Amino acid sequence: MIDLQPFWVTLKLALVTTTILLIISIPVANWLTYKKSRIKTIIETIISMPLVLPPTVLGFYLLLAFGPSHWLGKFLENYFDVRLVFSFPGLVVASVIYSLPFMVHPLQSGLSSLPATLKEASFSLGKNKWQTLFKVLLPNIKPSLLTGIVLSFAHTIGEFGVVLMIGGNIPGQTRVASIAIYDEVESLNYHSANIYAAILFVVTFIILLTVFSINRSFIRAKQL
Amino acid sequence: MINFTIYKTLHSSYGKMRLNISCEIQQGELATIYGVSGAGKTTILRILAGLLQAEKGFIEIEKQTWLDTDKYINLLPQKRDIGFVFQDYALFPNMTVRKNLEYALEKEQNKDIIYELIDMMELSQLQHHKPSMLSGGQKQRVALARALVRKPKLLLLDEPFSALDNEMRIKAQDIILKMHRHYNLTTILVSHDISEIFKMSNKVFILDKGVITKHGNPQQIFFSQELSSKFKFIGDVIAIDKEDILYVVTVLIGNNMVKIVAIEEDIKELIPGDKVMVASKAFNPLIRKMKFE
């Protein structure tokens, strides 16, 4: 019988990561869209770096930073009793950083495609920034929200390098599906690897197919 | 009464331009800012609304200061009691017509104003439609209604008629006049159409390259000498043709084309596209009821 636990770990990681990303990316994307600040370019660069940086580089630095010999790791362990290396919370932190551009970019491009007058009209009607964001701006970029959610979810499922560096391969803790496949291949257990791989393949296909069809219906609804 | 002084450097298509104006408008007046595009008309409205910062300026409305750069006072758009109708109407696509109006309600404001506006603007048939289903004229009525929900002290209209065809335009003008009177508003409207200004407003400010060159009532402004004419119309010059020693000027007045004989002196400064007044002094015009068979 095949061990399904890696899938539950993966699913949990993807759900937690996507939720956290959604919460932090909305204000970040809002800030990046509307602020004209000099540090904006630097922030944008930092957020986009996981797109090009090898995951192992990111994982390596996180491993150093969260390790018990580094001040950050020490601080977290002494004051919050949290150890981020080789633990599930550590995986979440790493995934959030790693998938940040996949959530921020769609939201940012969605917001900047809206006419500026929508926001101004809301202000002129006496509504503050947050009322405007949640009642006017976000409801009008539903396709971007969906794209962001799905891309970060799918990207987290497919994560390998970062997870391996900072999470290792602890069953039930940090052993996610992609690691499990690697592990099975290493021990020449091709049959199990094949099943894991096939499941990931199908799940990813279904997720993306759903997004594209929903987005198409959004666009069609807009044209009506 | 509203009075304001605004100073700002603009970067327009003509290069750097200084906007430097001072206006005074009485409560209940409908004033127009007239000028070619790029003269800074919209900028003035945006600064009044607080959507754009002036470098230096002062805005006071009914003894309430909205902006005073010397005293570092600059109220947020939310705190200024304005209604703004944008050129693109800026209706919220995710809300129905009714929800667009309800969104503008202040906390604990009575909903009766919504029913009143829907009724007055003839929107009851459309109230559950999304903005994407509406025509230009309908969108504009919704935008105007939405701007009036909070009963603003100052109504700002940015080229409200530019995107409408002739018939819709006349209807829209009538509705704006009706609302202006009904709610006793102070209204500032931006326009580059002289006939529109004659119909709508009692005060006009001519804006040219960032400064107000003239202001007063439209009669005084657009025609230097006052004619004591029996009847007069405003139209656009379509063509100027030479016939023997005379000229024939074709003028479009409303939907009618008229030909007017002119001498060389008259047409010296005229080119097609100019706004002109066609007036008669010596003859008695005849009037007959139109019969449609």
Image (tube, grey):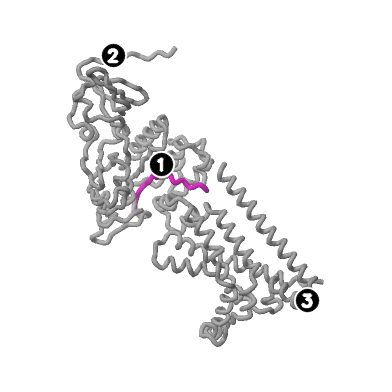
Residue at the spot of label 3:
A188
Q: Residue drawn at (58%, 72%), measured in percent from left and top?
A: A54
The part of the chain drawn in magenta is B80-94
Q: Tell me the kind of residue under disc 2.
A: Leu
Residue B139 x, y percent position in the rendering: 46, 40
The answer to whether residue A106 is above or below residue A5 is above
Q: Say which mark, if any, is on residue A59.
A: none
Q: Tell me the kind of residue under disc 3.
A: Leu
Question: Which image quadrant is residue B227 in?
Answer: top left
Quadrant showing the C terminus of chain B: top left
Q: Is residue B91 magenta?
A: yes
Q: Does residue B246 appear to the left or right of A40 in the view shown?
A: left
Discs 3 and 1 lie in a common subunit? no
Discs 2 and 1 lie in a common subunit? yes
Q: Residue drawn at (28%, 14%), measured in percent from left and top?
A: B286
Is the C-beta separation of discs 3 and 1 under 8 Å?
no
Q: Tell me the kind of residue under disc 1.
A: Leu
Chain on which label 3 sits: A
Q: Does residue A5 appear to the left or right of A93 in the view shown?
A: right
Is the C-beta separation of discs 2 and 1 under 8 Å?
no
Could you tell me how far apart the alpha carbons at marks 3 and 2 are, in whole angstroms?
106 Å
Residue at the spot of label 1:
B144
Please rate how many residues cluster around mark 1, counting C-alpha atoms within 10 Å: few if below 14, some from 14 to 19, many from 20: many
